[in-house]
């Protein structure tokens, strides 16, 4: 996906010679978690809002250069890697550097999230299946094969949780053959975490449980 059109240039980076009180005043007017900082015309990192309010406002940014966070992405960085960079750095602004590490501007988190919202994973009509299996036992190719051999399209999948050597994978599929897909996952020893109205297996268990309760109450 094209991301360069989302680069914003309405905020000039602070120079390291900027007084902290001026940085604080800018943060008072913005909703950003960070603002980029330059030295001799080159990007050197971001100052966070939290840090800016903790610094002595009579000093300069250069006095706290050690606290700058050097995160950034390049102009050719994939949008998924950009989204990951936002998450890893707990920021809602992401500086963008050119081929020679020159500062080009920044991305806003909301703009990059909108790219994800426009993917088939979110905007195509379908169903969500969450399955779980041992971290050494699952494979994306097997999951895709299970879905596609049941005659259903797959719109996307991702690892949504890892815990105690088990991996949970969230899969977006077409609406058809949901029960067949769920049963096939079970035959391949996947634990189906999500609940589905079409799941005949759970219906059978419920009927057997109700029958057993009636038998025991006779």
Image (cartoon, rainbow, N blue to C red):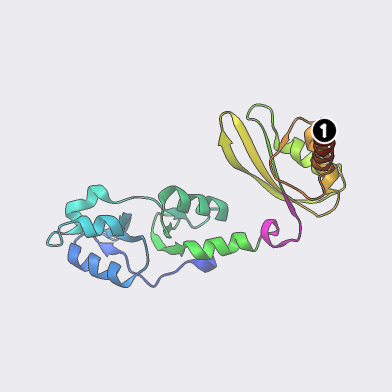
The single residue placed furthest to the left in the displayed view is 58
Q: Residue furthest top?
A: 136
Q: Is 106 included in the stretch rendered in magenta?
A: no
Residue 172 x/y as whole percent: 72, 51
Quarter of the image for residue 138 reads top right
Residue 66: x, y in percent? Answer: 24, 47
Residue at 33 percent of width and 50 percent of height: 69
Question: Residue drawn 87% across and 47% down?
Answer: 151
Residue 17 image offset from top left, x and y in percent: 19, 61
Residues 136 and 102: in front is: 136
**Would you name the residue on which mark 1 appears?**
212
Q: Is residue 159 above or below residue 55?
A: above
Q: Residue furthest front?
A: 218
Which quarter of the image is occupied by the C terminus? Answer: top right
Which residue occupies the foreground of this view, 39 or 128? 128
Give the residues in magenta.
119-128
Image height of 20 relative to 72, above or below: below
Question: How many C-alpha atoms fall within 10 Å of the one at disc 1: few (<14), some, or many (≥20)?
Answer: few
Q: Position of residue 48 (x, y in %)?
A: 31, 56
Which residue is depicted at the point 37% across and 64% down?
32
Secondary structure at numbered mark 1: helix
Q: How many marks?
A: 1
Q: Quadrant of residue 101?
A: bottom left
Work out whether residue 155 or residue 133 is closer to the camera in this orientation and state it: 133
Query: In the visual, does 100 lie left or right of 59?
Result: right
Q: Is residue 178 visible?
A: yes
Please report the residue visible at 50 percent of the width from the left and 64 percent of the height from the top. 110
Query: Where, by quadrant of the figure, is residue 120 drawn?
Result: bottom right
Work out which quarter of the rendered image holds the N terminus and state it: bottom right
Q: Is residue 1 among what the camera can see? A: no
């Amino acid at each position: 996906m094209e991301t360069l059109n989302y680069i914003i240039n309405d905020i000039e980076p602070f120079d390291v010679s900027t007084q902290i009180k001026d940085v604080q005043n800018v943060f008072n007017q913005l909703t950003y978690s960070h603002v980029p900082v330059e030295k001799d015309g080159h990007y050197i990192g971001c100052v966070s809002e939290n840090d800016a309010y903790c610094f002595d406002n009579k000093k300069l940014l250069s006095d706290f250069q050690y606290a700058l966070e050097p995160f950034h992405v390049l102009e050719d960085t994939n949008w998924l890697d950009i989204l990951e960079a936002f998450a890893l750095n707990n920021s809602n602004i992401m500086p963008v550097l050119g081929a020679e590490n020159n500062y080009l501007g920044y991305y806003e988190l909301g703009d990059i999230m909108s790219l994800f919202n426009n993917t088939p994973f979110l905007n195509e009509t379908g169903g969500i299946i969450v399955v779980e299996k041992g971290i050494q036992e699952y494979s994306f190719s097997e999951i895709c094969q299970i879905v596609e051999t049941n005659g259903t399209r797959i719109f996307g999948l991702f690892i949504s949780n890892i815990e105690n050597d088990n991996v949970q994978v969230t899969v977006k599929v077409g609406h058809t053959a949901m029960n067949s897909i769920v049963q096939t996952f079970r035959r391949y020893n996947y634990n189906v975490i999500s609940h589905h109205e079409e799941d005949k297996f759970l219906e059978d268990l419920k009927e057997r449980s109700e029958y057993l309760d009636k038998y025991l109450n006779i």
